Amino acid sequence: MIEPASPVAVTPMSRALATINRLKGELAERTADQPLAVVGIGLRFPGQIDDLGALWQALSTGRDLTGDLPDRRRQRFSAEWAGLPQRGGFLGDVFGFDAKFFSIGPQEARAMDPQHRLLLEVAWEAFENGACVPNSRQSNPVGVYVGISTFDYLDWLGTAKGPFLAPGAGHCFAAGRIAHVLNLTGPAVAIDTACSSSLVALHLARQAICRGECTSALVAGVNLVLSPRTTRLLHYTTALSRQGVCRAFDARADGFVRSDGAAAIVVKRLSDAVRDADRIHAVIVGSAVNQDARSAALTAPSAPAQADVIGRALKDAGLGVADIGLIEAHGTGTALGDPIEVAGIASAFTGNGGRKLFVGSLKANTGHMEAAAGIGGLVKVIASLQQRTIPPLAHFTTLNPRIDLARVPIAFASEPTPWTSDIGRFAGVSSFGMSGTNAHVVVGSAPEEQPRDRAPVTGFEIGAQTPTALRELARRYHTHLAHMSDHDFAAFSYTATAVGRHHRMRARIAARDRRAAMAALHSLTDASSLYSVVAEPESPNPLDRVVADLPNYPWERKEYVLGSTS
């Protein structure tokens, strides 16, 4: 006869041990190496591109987004620019800045490198895009990781003096100022590994989140061509295109053109993003960084090192070579660099079962955004994953004869190509620094959203820092709603409220549907009817968290340049 087991006595010690084991399990789960969700995106690319929709339109049509150096920049250094390449990808108003929005005084704004100013704006836009704008009561640590490399604004210094010059120029302040202004308490780090800076920044942010140093992070990269300084140094290396065109992997390739650009993403653990009902743009599933070490020369690329960093990132992601359908390459369009890169890709993907592997490069559209190139390529891949389409490689007609495609069926899209099931579901993004630091990131599509019941909408808020900005935002929202479906009105209402509540001036719009909202917003654009729309209402019904794309904040920029007194 089997005697029944005696019940185990519960003692204070056993309860304590059970609690310890539970906490250990929770800690292990929190610090486990898991995918990161990209929940917010801000960008500023040549061609007046400031959102994913505009970017995809340019990519899908193979647009060349480059042009001539703006006169505003050439005039200050006209003699020094003579004889140097002056075609590239340029942003418009790089000296304009909404300093009052960020509570920055005129003296400090003039001393700030325009790259730092641009980062502040794009960072804010990324947080707004994710409906996760930081506030003064924020408790969870948010990290800031910035890729930045050049110091062109120092050439505008002249004889200027003052206490703001040092924090206006140093790269460390680019990250530190974002953390200071937005009250972010996680690590704030600026990274300079030349062209791979922003992708290395993402890798480090991913490690910090996995270690629990921060619960989410802003990752950004920036580059502005403000003086001949860096262009002259690159011209001496013969890396710049004499034709003024970046023809990545093409037989006519003779180098790259330089480009302005900035992008920022907000990342957090995938499990946290799902828990928080975030809108997920894409998922970072793996990353790796390595070094060329003793290659042919300090600045010479290494095919074995490039193959190794791709392999490490795939291993980190738990994927095989057949899972990758697209490589967003470094692809600078140099006659030597492109064949070396393709050799590295072919080595990494040997044995992929003969699956077609597409290779592209954003630089063929925009030029080389240098420190922002890696995150720029990542944003391009996110747009491609969302559209389930591989965009054409601009300026590509004839393969560089030095490129060998015998080992792997590598393809360069000549037109928008559907991302069908026979193509690997994931993408890789490469970024290689001139100093030899290489980075590779593996990206996948966002998980499918589960349908949810939504509470009825009774209204929403919009907000801005000034009456002028509020009316302009109302105009932009009105235009946006005119092209939006009725189904998306709830998401619009939630997002507008979430990003608007942080501002000094807010308007409450009482509207149960899209058409009523458009009528109210139209009234708000007229200053004389402001009080007929703004209400001091009873608390509105809480809105379900469903995040939608909205127009960017209407910055009220004013020019700040060293040597001016405005």
Image: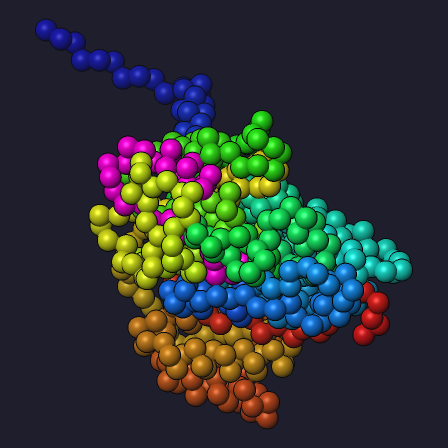
Residue 340 magenta:
yes
Q: Residue at x 46, y 86 (%)?
A: 520
Above or below 478: residue 261 = above
Q: Where does the image place residue 369, in percent across and percent down from the top left?
A: 57, 55
> Between 312 and 64, which is closer to the camera in this rendering?
64
Q: Could you tell me which residue is drawn at 24 percent across and 36 percent down?
A: 353
Percent x, y of residue 146: 61, 48
Magenta span of residues = 339-368
Classify the position of the C terminus by image quarter.
Answer: bottom right
Q: Residue at x 29, y 43 (%)?
A: 409
Relative vertical location of residue 339 with respect to residue 527 in this rendering, above or below:
above
Q: Nearer the viewer, residue 233 or 564?
A: 233
What percent of the width, then of the height, locates residue 230? 69, 52
Residue at the spot 78% in from the left edge and 64% down from the top edge? 79
The image quadrant of residue 308 is top left
Q: Is residue 72 covered in magenta?
A: no
Residue 540 appears left or right of 257: left
